[in-house]
Image (tube, rainbow, N blue to C red):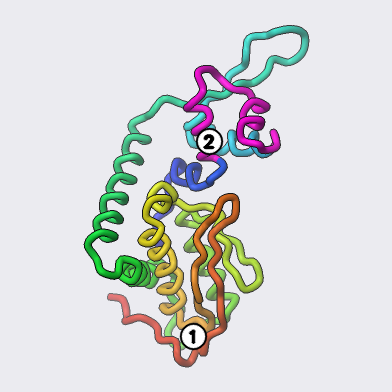
Amino acid sequence: MATKPSKTDRALASVTRMAVLDALRRANEPMTVQQIAEELGLHPNTIRFHLGRLAQADLVREDQADPTGPGRPRMVYTAAPATKGAEQETAYRLLAEILASYLAETSPSPAAVATAAGQEWGRYLVERPAPFAKMTREEAIDRVLAMLAQLGFEPELDGGRLLLRACPFRAVADRRPDVTCSVHLGLMRGALAEMGAPVEIVNLQPFSAPHPCVANLSESDASHAEAGPART
């Protein structure tokens, strides 16, 4: 089964939440929702939603501003100081960056190697069907969506496409998209192959903010799809 991402990973998987947190870290004093919204060019309600998710992950602190007149005091927000958990998250990201950069610089085909590695993990992470069971397109996609959701991708089915609205490896993907996105492509392809699914991933179009990554689906002949070797 897929390892569930930490609350910090889930919070930082969103491009918008990363932008909100960066704005608070740059600020010299606490910011209001309106100030953040104006700086990022977003609606205040959008900012409130993402601040709530950041606060749940202990990445942002919410306080009441000093009263300036009648009425309810305004709420202001600051970036929380780094914690030991955050330091560990940084260490894991550094490790991922080291491995991705090493692969990119030393392999003649880093994307192909990364895709192959992702396929092996996709086979391992997905829930495999029972022996001789025929997997429908809908069942296979549901299982891939569940796997991706556990990993923090916030996936959504949109007709013949899978939309990945968040990236739990965004910090590395920004610098090494050839490796990181290829791993993600391999995860989905490996999972579908393991299930002998009558559908396959044609390609993965990497993110271009504010748009999500898009994995394009295509029907495949299930009779030619071979499940992976039996697990022991």
In this picture, residue 227 sits left or right of residue 45: left
Residue drawn at (33%, 35%) of the image: 87
Q: Is residue 112 left or right of residue 11?
A: left
- Quadrant for the C terminus, please: bottom left
Label 2: how many residues lie within 10 Å, few (<14), some (14-19) or many (20+)? many
User: Are the residues tagged 2 and 1 within 8 Å (C-beta)?
Assistant: no
The location of residue 134, given as percent across then percent down, is: 51, 86
Mark 2–mark 1 Cα distance, whole angstroms, equals 42 Å
Q: Residue at x 35, y 67 (%)?
A: 111
Tell me the SS state at disc 2: helix
Residue 121: x and y in percent read 35, 67
Residue 105 occupies quadrant: bottom left
Amino acid type shown at disc 2: Leu
Highlighted range, magenta: 17-45
Q: Amino acid at mark 1?
A: Ala
For residue 54, which numbered disc appears in the image? 2
Which x, y percent locates residue 6?
Answer: 42, 45
**Is 71 colored magenta in this rendering?**
no
Identify the residue under disc 1.
133
Q: Between 100 and 155, which is closer to the camera in this rendering?
A: 100
Q: Answer with left or right where residue 48 lies relative to residue 200.
A: right
Q: Earlier in the sequence, mark 2 or mark 1?
A: 2
**From what the image shows, is residue 205 above or below residue 229?**
above
